[in-house]
Amino acid sequence: MQTDTSTAINDVVSVSLSQYSQLPCAPQPGKYTVLASFALHDPRTRRTRLLSLGTGAKCLPEARLPKHGEALHDSHAEVIARRGAIRWLLEEVQRDARARARALTEPVADESSFVSGSESTWVYARPDGLYALRDNLQLWMYASTVPCTSLSDGPLFRLSSLIFVAHS
């Protein structure tokens, strides 16, 4: 029998690899890339929402950094995936805030689908106006390999290695 944690791990890895395999690009034969992803998982429903995928394993050397910031300095898979997850979360908050604003001005046809003006399955507005993940959701990070030395010294690796599952 699988535990909740192993079920979540399997679900997150499965959805990440499935989505990656559907992309129109792939590493050249004989080459590989690092894949990282962030996903939300609801252990009650076993629903998993892939937030982002990232691939890559490089940082630009200081000599190649543009003066005006027009290139991405750190393109490690974990960094790209983290940026994508943050963007998705901010967009989800924005979608929910717009839905709440509409709910204040428009009549609701079906009261059963209306949850405090919120339409998001993943986030909600707290009474203080800030947003949070819904109860019991887990935020997962998947990486296809151990981070390289330059990334493993940073806070992202320390956080992910100490707390693999972040509960809301």
Image (cartoon, rainbow, N blue to C red):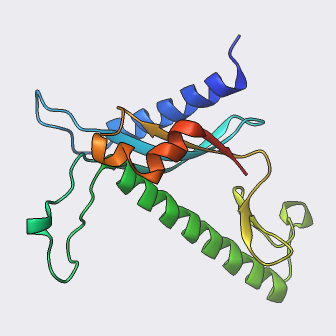
* 108 vs 37: above or below: below
Q: Residue at x 27, y 55 (%)?
A: 75
* Place of residue 161 in the rendered image (x, y in percent of width and height, measured from the top left): 51, 37
* Place of residue 109 in the rendered image (x, y in percent of width and height, measured from the top left): 86, 72
* Place of residue 87 in the rendered image (x, y in percent of width and height, measured from the top left): 49, 66
Q: Residue at x 81, y 85 (%)?
A: 106
Q: Nearer the viewer, residue 64 or 140?
A: 64
Q: Residue at x 66, y 27 (%)?
A: 5
* 114 vs 48: above or below: below
Q: Nearer the viewer, residue 139 or 73?
A: 73
Residue at the bottom extreme, as displayed: 105
81 displayed left or right of 165: left
Residue at the right extreme, as displayed: 111
109 displayed left or right of 123: right
Q: Nearer the viewer, residue 43 or 62?
A: 62
Say which quadrant the N terminus sits in. Answer: top right
Q: Residue at x 70, y 19 (%)?
A: 3
47 displayed left or right of 52: right
Q: Nearer the viewer, residue 119 or 29?
A: 29
Residue at the top extreme, as displayed: 1
12 displayed left or right of 54: right
* 130 vs 29: above or below: below
**Which picture quadrant has residue 62?**
bottom left
